[in-house]
Image (spheres, helix red, strand yellow):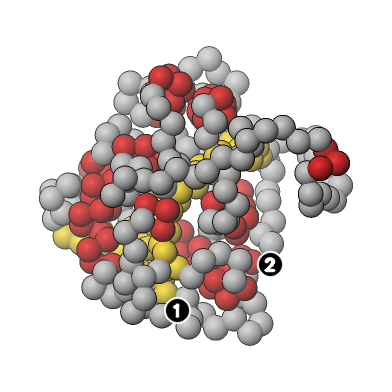
Amino acid sequence: MAPKPFPLRVGRMRWEDRGVITRVPFNALPLDQSEVFYEHGPDSSRQPGVVPGRTIALTIDGPAAFPGTTRGVWIHVPAGLRVDCPVRVTIFCDGAWYLDPAGDIRAGIVLDNLVAAGVIPPQVGVFVDPGVFPDAVDEDARRNRNAEYDADGPGYADFLRDEVLPRVRDHVTLGDDPRDRALCGGSSGGNACFTAAWHRPEEFARVVAFSASFAQMPGGNPYPVRIAREPRKALRVFLVAEHRDLQWNEPRMNWFAESLETAAALARKGYDVRLVLGDAGHGPRHGGVLLPDALRWVWREDPGPTR
């Protein structure tokens, strides 16, 4: 099925004609950026009256895309969600880490709260771990995370489409529209999500990427040039860049700069993109704090940016 683009609003508007004005309370910038720690908001904690969802645990052994690996997959179904009708889905890389209710991301809790409040469409969360080679002795040799996440190409997208989503459909009913699917991840998981949507926009139309490791992709970050040269795809993208990310003030392998340059290329091309800048280093905390707002934004019904 050919993806439908997010429609654009055309024309310039005067400030006084822009409708609702969102007022942001004053908050002083941290002067010392050596160790910035962001605090979670209320949507990242259990809320009174919100019934916790249920989680279904699966295992995928020896997938065709990544032979010899095994991994856990978890389907989180918010309370009251009808699974016999097509529902939307957000797929999270580093699944166990993102699902952990005591961790930095707490995505299961966030989904429960946002679905219960009606601020995102009814949906399930699918949490996919990177593969490991169970018989490998060396810990580095066991992990297949970077081989899966940093690769440039449709391999990871095809794995999600062909080997993960069919397992999910054994338990819930999913729609086929790419706009019914979002991808979310951080670090190498962030660029894995962007790469999957880039190569398979007919499958995945919404992306949330926290502190993506574009700099670490083999051959370097291909996206600033690729975005400029290729026709605009039907994608909506939420990016987070941290000012003190890895090599933030270095001329090469600069995580911060590569995220900025990717966001700038998307903006110049007219994509529906939002960039949030943080003052932290490379880690999951700020992404976890932002996750409720990232999901609100990426799943919003608003048609897209002014063009």
Rendered image quadrant of residue 144: top left
Q: Is residue 300 left or right of residue 83?
A: right
The residue that appears at 18% across and 47% down in the rendered structure is 66
- Cα separation between marks 2 and 1: 22 Å
Rendered image quadrant of residue 116: bottom right
Q: Please tell me how crowded label 2 is: few (under 14), some (14-19), or many (20+) other residues with Cα within 10 Å.
A: few
Amino acid on which disc 1 is placed: Leu
In the foreground, 302 or 299: 302
Look at mark 2 in the image and give the residue it sits on. 42
x, y percentage for residue 81?
45, 79
The residue that appears at 79% across and 52% down in the rendered structure is 20
In the displayed orientation, state which residue is furthest to the front.
11
**From the viewer's perspective, is residue 185 above or below residue 91?**
above
In the foreground, 294 or 201: 201
Disc number lying in front (2 or 1): 1
The residue that appears at 86% across and 47% down in the rendered structure is 26
x, y percentage for residue 147?
27, 38
**From the viewer's perspective, is residue 232 above or below residue 119?**
above
Which element type, helix, strand or loop, lies under badge 1?
loop
x, y percentage for residue 98?
46, 59
Amino acid on which disc 2 is placed: Pro
x, y percentage for residue 73?
30, 64
Look at mark 1 in the image and give the residue it sits on. 81
The residue that appears at 53% across and 15% down in the rendered structure is 251
**Is residue 122 in view?**
yes
> Is the residue under label 1 in contact with that under label 2 (CB below 8 Å)?
no
Residue 220 shows which numbered tag? none
Q: Please tell me how crowded label 1 is: few (under 14), some (14-19), or many (20+) other residues with Cα within 10 Å.
A: some
